[in-house]
Amino acid sequence: MEIDILERLKKSLVGKVVILGIGNPLRGDDAFGSLFAEELMGKISLIVLNGGSNPENLLGKIIQENPDTILFVDAVDLGRNWGDTSLFEADEVKASLFFFTHNSSLRLIFDFLKENTQAKIHLLAIQPKSINLGDKLSAEIEEKLNFLTGWFIKNYSL
């Protein structure tokens, strides 16, 4: 994990923060965002939601929370090495530049939330190793999951 990303995360998570983990637990590393959310729920002072495979179902809840910052956590094919992690602002995410490992387009969700909140929106993306149906979480991605959740618990514990 690059220290730069952790420093950028710390600077980005300001005010009232909602974290939305996204992922399909049946598709290997695609489960990353959901597992991230599950691991942090009830352990940190930020609002953590698990959007699973259908993050759009939680948009009303996010809007009701009236957050200053929204952080999406998802496995995204960035064309990089397994486990590489990047932090993007919503405006940097163009539908044609990323392959999201699930069906819903985060770009559409970002646009909807930008219209309905004043929140700054960020995406913490991890490069998956395998997203095949029936795969288990790869060791490389599990290592990143443990590292990142540990960092969040250390920095944002209740």
Image: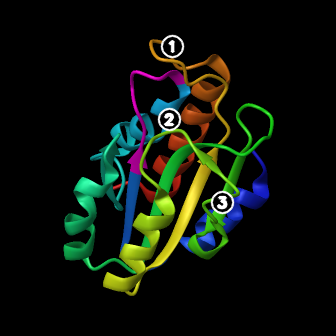
Across and down, in percent, residue 1 comes to 74, 44
Q: Which residues are magenta?
A: 21-28
Find disc 2 in the rendering and name its residue.
32
Find disc 3 in the rendering and name its residue.
87
Residue type, numbered disc 2: Phe
Q: Residues within 10 Å of mark 2 (few under 14, many from 20)?
A: many
Q: Main secondary structure of the magenta part?
A: loop
Residue 18 sits in quarter = bottom left
Instruction: State the residue at coordinates (74%, 41%).
Output: 84
Instruction: State the residue at coordinates (64%, 65%).
Output: 94
Across and down, in percent, residue 6 comes to 67, 57
The answer to if 86 sits in the magenta stretch is no
Sequence-earlier tag: 2 or 1: 2
Residue 117 visible in the snapshot:
no
**Disc 2 to disc 3, how far (Cα)?**
15 Å
Give the SS element for disc 2: helix
Across and down, in percent, residue 64 comes to 19, 75
Across and down, in percent, residue 118 comes to 39, 87
Give the SS element for disc 3: strand
| Camera-side mark, 2 or 1 | 1
